[in-house]
Amino acid sequence: MFSGESITLTCEVQGGGTTEWTCEWRRSGSIIHKTDSKDWTFIVSESSSGNYMCQCRSRDDWYSSTQRSETIRLSVSRDKPGAKLTAGSSTIPVGGSVTLSCSVEPSAGWKYKWFRRTSDSSFVEFSRNNEENREITVTQGGIYKCDGKRGNPSFYSHSSLENIIEIMFSNKVFVTRQPNGSHVFSGESITLTCEVQGGETTEWTCEWRRSGS
């Protein structure tokens, strides 16, 4: 677990029936807590690491107690984990989709929140449900990230790195220039045109590269 998370330990008494119990909890051999129920909920920190066991006594007969339980090992890390986002592809073909996956390691029990933004907007959460939601399918281009959460109250991981997903149009693109010819002279004006076949009705923003940059 991670420092700041909430955990519930339950001392199960086999054959305890309707008996009301007071339970004491030990960590690494020392009594650290007593409860008037079988459950103990607390927020963990690094100092919470250790071996836990419990023992209960009947409230009707304080001199009658259960055996001590077996121990469980609890390890608590100080550093909050980070979510990792992976994409099946960085481009979406027109009319297609891309699968995005989110994970938090090491450990289990995480649910995931997904966010999307564009170059001129802030992140907006989407795909809200109560499922694990580890994988989603997207059809929109944009900048995506995800968070992991678990427990009640919810404990959140660090957000994943942002992942850019672009829609790849099938239109062919080529460059024309005016004036034509292989040479121009310093001081001349030249117009380069990025022709998009079949893209006449679409408004485009174009980026230009020279020698790859």
Image (cartoon, rainbow, N blue to C red):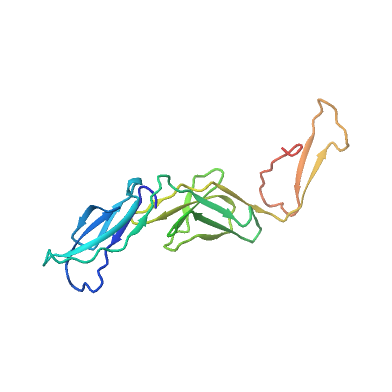
**Quadrant of the rendered structure where residue 34 is?**
bottom left
Furthest toward the left, the residue is 60
The image position of residue 119, as x and y in percent, is 56, 44
Residue 189 lies, with reference to residue 129, above or below; the image says above
Camera-nearest residue between 71 and 74: 71
Number of disc labels = 0
- Quadrant location, the C terminus: top right
The spot of residue 137 in percent (x, y) is: 56, 61
Viewer-closest of 208 and 147:
147
Q: Quadrant of residue 186?
A: top right
* Residue at (23, 63) in percent of width and height: 38
93 relative to 50 in the view: left or right? right
Q: Position of residue 59 (x, y in %)?
A: 13, 65
Of residues 30 and 129, the one nearer the viewer is 30
Residue located at (72% from left, 51% from top): 200
Expressed as whole percent of the image width and height from the top left, the position of residue 204 reads: 67, 46
Please tell me which residue is depicted at 62% across the width and 57% down the height of the picture: 88
* Residue 17 drawn above or below residue 35: below
